[in-house]
Image: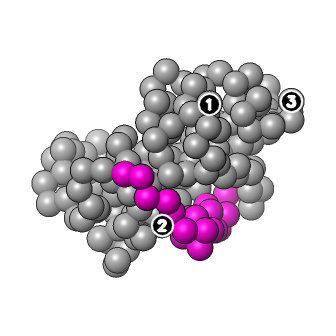
Amino acid sequence: METWDAITSRRNVRQFDARTISDADLDRILEAGRRAPSARNRQPWDFVLVTDRAQLGELSKVWRGAGHVADAAAAVALVTADSDDERSRSVAQYDLGQCTMQMLIAAADLGIASGHASVDDQDQARRVLGLPQDRIAVYILDFGYPADRRLKPIVNPDRRPFDEVVHRGRF
C-alpha cells in the first residue's frame, strides 16, 4: 500500500478471522514501533508480543473493554517504566502514542487490522506478561485479519469536517 492508503484504510477492528499472522509481518509491525521517534531518543518502551490463544484470553481481562484481544491473532503490550514523576509519565505517553500509530499504520500497510485497549488491571498484566514490578503495561494493541471486510481506503470517514478541525494562524 501507499502510505496515504494505509493511513486512510486503518480503522479499529474488534472482530478478527481465525488466520494467523506470519512472524515476518509481526516483526515488521514491531520494527515500526521500535523505530518511532521519542523525546531525546529515550525510547521508553518495551514490547511483549503475545500469540498464544490462552494467553490472549487472559490478557483480554486487563480492561473491561479489551474483550476483543482474546480473538486477535496477536497482541502487543506496550510496556514502560512505572514512575511517580508526572513529567516522565507524560513524555512516555506521548512517545508511546507515536510508537502505537507507527505500528497500526505498518499493520494496515500489510492488510492487517488492529485495535487497541487500555490497561486497568496491572496485577493481571504482570501475571500474564511476566512484567517486573518497576514496569507497567500502558496499552494493548491487537492485530488480525478483519472478520467482516478487508482494509481499504475509507472515502467518507466519520470525522468532524476538515474546516471545523483546522484553524490557520488563530483559533
> Callout 1: helix, strand or loop?
helix
Estimate the x, y position of residue 105 in percent, counting from the top left: 44, 62
* Amino acid type shown at disc 2: Ala
Is mark 1 in CB contact (under 8 Å) with mark 3?
A: no
**Picture residue at 46% right of the left edge, 41% below the top:** 71
- At mark 3, the secondary structure is loop
Please give left or right for residue 158 compared with residue 18 in the image.
Answer: left
The residue to which callout 3 is attached is 133
Secondary structure of the residue carrying tag 2 is helix
Question: Residue at point 34% right, 63% down?
Answer: 7
Classify residue 88 as left or right of residue 157. right
Q: Position of residue 62 (x, y in %)?
A: 60, 26
Q: CA distance from mark 3 to mark 2?
A: 31 Å
Task: Residue 121: tell me if it is visible.
Answer: yes
Magenta-drawn segment: 17-40
Labelled disc at residue 106: 2
Q: Is residue 98 visible?
A: no
Crowd rating for badge 3 (residues with CA inside 10 Å; few <14, some 14–19, many 20+): few
Q: The N terminus is located in which quarter?
A: bottom left
